[in-house]
Amino acid sequence: ELKVEQNPLFLSMQEGKNYTIYCNYSTTSDRLYWYRQDPGKSLESLFVLLSNGAVKQEGRLMASLDTKARLSTLHITAAVHDLSATYFCAGGGGADGLTFGKGTHLIIQP
Amino acid sequence: DTEVTQTPKHLVMGMTNKKSLKCEQHMGHRAMYWYKQKAKKPPELMFVYSYEKLSINESVPSRFSPECPNSSLLNLHLHALQPEDSALYLCASSLQDSYYEQYFGPGTRLTVT
């Protein structure tokens, strides 16, 4: 059974700072997903990481995957308030559905 | 069209009511999913349909009954729910059931009184 662990679960940071969210998973997973969720809203797909060493960037967010270490990271560069949200990583997928981490509640303060 | 739609957006029902949630996608996706999300928790998988056949039922109580009438439509029939079933119900779809990206609908906020 796949288990996904995120840390930290809560992160308060100032605008302009950099930070990284970590996602560890328990068994082999060829793919790792990152989603964003705003309060009261649904999930927005951010990144799909398909293979070892994959790195994807969109604006101030960059995600990477190390399948040997069973670790994915979501790096935030020069944070801005609009990035405040809850970020989920998820593994598995397909016929087994997604298994989500507990989420990282990110607050970015001016 | 890269959208998954869900209706209704909000639903309040009593414990003796029968209601249904509807999910629709027109992206040609052949796998569809129901997830349940409680406040401040991650989504939890309930059901998976692959090519209109139920492939996973995650030990969900029988008061939740899924239905997939065709490849574009997914329903969740609700009967005799409990207050603890109040949650955000999310529908998702993916191209196939082989590790393709899942697209989520806006969700139905369900309150059971």
Image: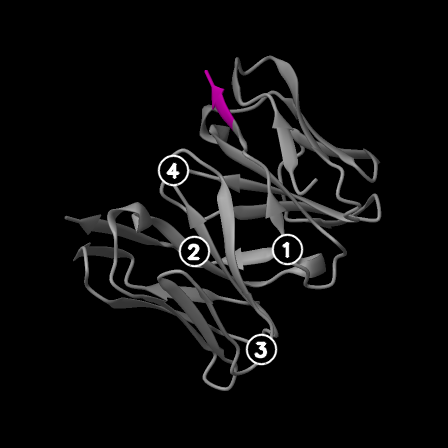
The tag on residue A97 is 1
Whether discs 3 and 4 lie on one chain: the answer is no
Residue contact at pointers 2 and 4, CB within 8 angstroms: no
Residue with the mark numbered 2? A88
Look at label 4 and name its amino acid.
Ala
Q: CA distance from mark 3 to mark 4?
A: 29 Å
Vertical side of B50 occupied by A24: above or below: below
Whether discs 3 and 2 lie on one chain: the answer is yes
- Marks 2, 4: nearer the viewer: 2
Look at label 3 and name its amino acid.
Thr
- Helix, strand or loop at label 4? It is loop
Look at label 1 and name its amino acid.
Gly
Please provide percent x and percent y for residue B53: 83, 46
Residue contact at pointers 3 and 2, CB within 8 angstroms: no
* Residue under the image location 54 percent in, 34 percent down: B106
The tag on residue A28 is 3
The kind of secondary structure the magenta stretch mainly shows is strand
* Residue under the image location 45 percent in, 74 percent down: A64
Residue with the mark numbered 4? B39
